[in-house]
Image (cartoon, rainbow, N blue to C red):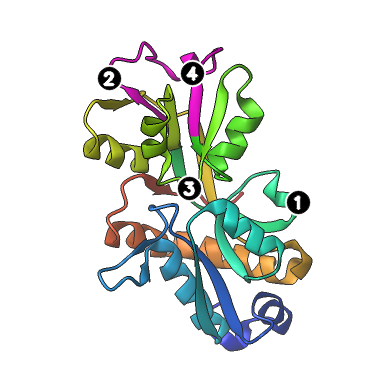
Amino acid sequence: MTACSTIPPAAREALAPQGTLRAAINFGNPILANKDAAGQPTGVSVDLARELAKRLDVKLELVTFTSAGAVVDALKANKVDIAFVAIDPLRGQDVLYSAAYVVIEGAYLVRQGSPIRRNEEVDRPGIRVAVGKGSAYDLYLTREIKQATLERAPTSPAVVDFFLAQNLEVAAGVKQQLEADAKRVPGLRLLDGRFMVINQAMGTPRVRGEAGVAYLRGFVEEMKASGFVAQALQRHKIEGAAVAPAAP
């Protein structure tokens, strides 16, 4: 898979029909992407996008977003060719996925004085939970939460400030983001454990058909097996995620 000549023409046509690979980069998930000192995109997803464009032998255009919801909307509208998104059944109606390349934990955060001590105590009447609109854990909790109420912040990085400003009981998010917020803001604590595991994959618009995603699936498996993903996580000092296991 290293030589561009071995790539099926149908795969290149499906993934980069205009001769440029338009990759959606989501700054709303700091595990996958951030801005460097010059304000340019950097991170695991950027590294993977560059490697994929190199193998396809096409130019790369990084299209940046601040939330997963906006990324999925762009995929649905065919405005990007690939994206780095969490696997979710609802999104799967419009998106074809690879297997996961990293797994991320979803966690809850509360104030130090909160009576809530365990994840199971969150879904109770009168409990309001801040989530990032359109995020993987928003979609998950929308399905799973029966008694508590979800309150949506515009993006995932804004969740804790939204939780504080609205005086809500719980903030939900990617564990690493919440850990950083707990260090930034005194008087907060994370509940032990996790309420979900988020499987981050590469996706492409469903309308592109199977040729492109079949190549993506092989690409992701090679990136995991070769150590590329592990090295990228280490290089970018990411502690809140682990390399996903090989696809069955």
Density class for disc 1 (Cα within 10 Å; few <14, some 14-19, many ≥20) is few
**Mark 2 or mark 1: which is in front?**
2
Tag 2's secondary structure? Answer: loop
Q: Is residue 11 above or below residue 69?
A: below
Q: Is residue 29 above or below residue 142?
A: below
Tell me the residue that label 4 is attached to: 122
CA separation, marks 4 and 3? Answer: 21 Å
CA separation, marks 1 and 4? Answer: 29 Å
Q: Is residue 60 above or below residue 102?
A: below
- Give the image location of residue 203, x and y in percent: 62, 60
**Mark 3 or mark 1: which is in front?**
3
CA separation, marks 3 and 2? Answer: 24 Å
- Give the image location of residue 144, x and y in percent: 62, 26
Labels 4 and 3: the sequence-earlier one = 4
Q: Nearer the viewer, residue 34 or 1?
A: 34
- Range of magenta residues: 106-130
What's under tag 1, amino acid-wise? Gln
**Mark 1 or mark 4: which is in front?**
4
Tag 4's secondary structure? Answer: loop
Tell me the residue that label 3 is attached to: 155
Q: Is residue 50 left or right of residue 139?
A: left
Labels 1 and 4: the sequence-earlier one = 1
Q: Which residue is at a point 60% across and 23% down the rendered structure image?
A: 145
Residue 93, label in figure: 1
Which quadrant holds residue 232?
A: bottom left
What's under tag 3, amino acid-wise? Thr
Q: Which residue is at a point 36% across and 38% down the rendered structure image?
A: 161
Residues tagged 3 and 2 counted as in contact (Cβ below 8 A):
no
Density class for disc 3 (Cα within 10 Å; few <14, some 14-19, many ≥20) is many
